Image (tube, helix red, strand yellow):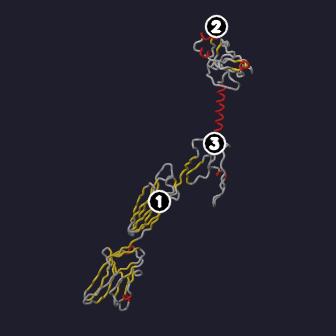
Amino acid sequence: MDSVKSGFVGSQVELRCIFVNSNPPVKISQVTWQKFLNGTKQNVAIANPSLGVSVLPPFKERVTFKRAEVRHRTPSLEDTTIMFSNLRLSDEAAYICEYTTFPAGNRENMVNLTVFARPLTRMTLTTPTIVARPQKRKMTVATCLSANGKPQSVIKWDTRLKGEATFQETQNSNGTVTVRSNYVVVPSRETHKQKLTCIVTYRNERITDSVVLNVQYEPEVKIEGFDGNWYLNRQDVSLTCSTDANPPVTVYQWKLTDTPLPSVFSYPEFPNNPPPGGREIPQKQHNAGAVIGCAVGGVILLAAAATLLFVFLRRRQRTFKGDYSTKKQVFGNGYSKAGGLPSHPPIPKNLQYPDDSDDEKKPAQIAVTGGFEASERDFDGDAEDLKRPYFTVDEGESQDYDERTLAFQYDPETEIADDMVSQTDGSVISKKEWYV
């Protein structure tokens, strides 16, 4: 006999028993198969040369003698191997094959039968849709089950997710074991579409099952296209709004801070093709791509115009307050056309600082003895300004001055005649003299 035999639930197994005749030969009177369990023997099948073959309940429908000679009227009992079909977990036991001989007596041997139960393995999501919560709480996202196995299975997980697994074993009354493992993770946008594989090892078998997580999470919005170098009248600029969300975003709306976009903003036109098997999407939903390049240019243009207007008004307030209709020709250091030192225009007795504070607007009396040289002796800090050659401003020309610039007006000089030529020293002579 074989010392051990095994089979799976529902399968068929062969229990071999062969009698080798001794020398001198003996007579086989009967062969009996018995189940030995917990110290108790139970008859399974009997073969007797005179009485024939008998299989006892509950094995009658599932146990037969392998060789047909055993069932003949004149049987041959040297090989009494039996076949167990449709194995049950309750069939697991030790089986004894006993020969009754004459005159040698009884001879027996034993085989241990082990019945295995292949587990039912499956992997499921705890819910079809997993939602990422702001609280970032852990939750069980998938369960791997190996049920009613004998011997018990070993479960492992294969994934890139940073989660943890829990395990639970349950001993069933029929001798099988159910193993359950839950995979726990914090749902987030990073866990969306991640693959989760359960690996069940049963004896020498490796069983795998996989799922892909479907995690719903709030939109993450990005605006792209601004390179930090936008300027007035720059062409072909645009901003693109992109989102990452599950389910995907279907409606886009551009706005300034708590204000709708002005009409200057334009949206690219996209074909309004309805999705396969779905309803037509409104055109406004398509106008959400790169949309506001021209609008930003318009806003910048308005800002630039306002800035230029402010600068213009500011400079106008600070413009020189002389006679802009006067036309002068200045020669050298301010000497007259005749080459002599001109008499300086009379200095006003009241000097005023226009557009200053109230204290500065008070007039200052200055005593003047007359003449350029006298003013040169009597003035101190302001004398330097009076020594400088006087100047005029051409028509249409403007220049910025300090607010404390004195305001003088001088009588216009006579234009140089057409027949006069200016000299390098500032004097002028007649063209007739020049060519003589």
Are the residues flagged by discs 3 and 1 in contact, CB closer than 8 Å?
Answer: no
Nearer mark to the viewer, of 3 and 1: 3
Residue 254: image location, x then y, percent: 62, 46
Farthest front residue in view: 436
Say which residue label 1 marks: 196
* Neighbourhood count class around disc 1 (C-alpha, 10 Å): few under 14, some 14–19, many 20 upward: some
Residue 268: image location, x then y, percent: 65, 49
Distance from disc 3 to disc 2, alpha carbons, whole Å, reads 65 Å
> Could you tell whether 208 is left or right of 260 in the image?
left
Residue 413: image location, x then y, percent: 71, 17
Say which residue label 2 marks: 369
Distance from disc 1 to disc 2, alpha carbons, whole Å, reads 106 Å
Amino acid on which disc 2 is placed: Thr
Q: Residue at x 63, y 42 (%)?
A: 234
* Total numbered labels: 3
In the rendered structure, which disc, 3 or 2, sits on the residue that comes first in sequence? 3
Image quarter for residue 201? bottom left
Farthest top residue in view: 369
> Could you tell whether 311 is left or right of 148 in the image?
right
- Say if 64 sits above or below 321 in the image: below
In the rendered structure, which disc, 3 or 1, sits on the residue that comes first in sequence? 1
Q: Residue at x 59, y 48 (%)?
A: 241
Distance from disc 3 to disc 1, alpha carbons, whole Å, reads 50 Å
Amino acid on which disc 1 is placed: Leu
- Say if 236 sits above or below 380 in the image: below
Q: Which mark is residue 234?
A: 3
Give the secondary structure at mark 2.
Answer: loop
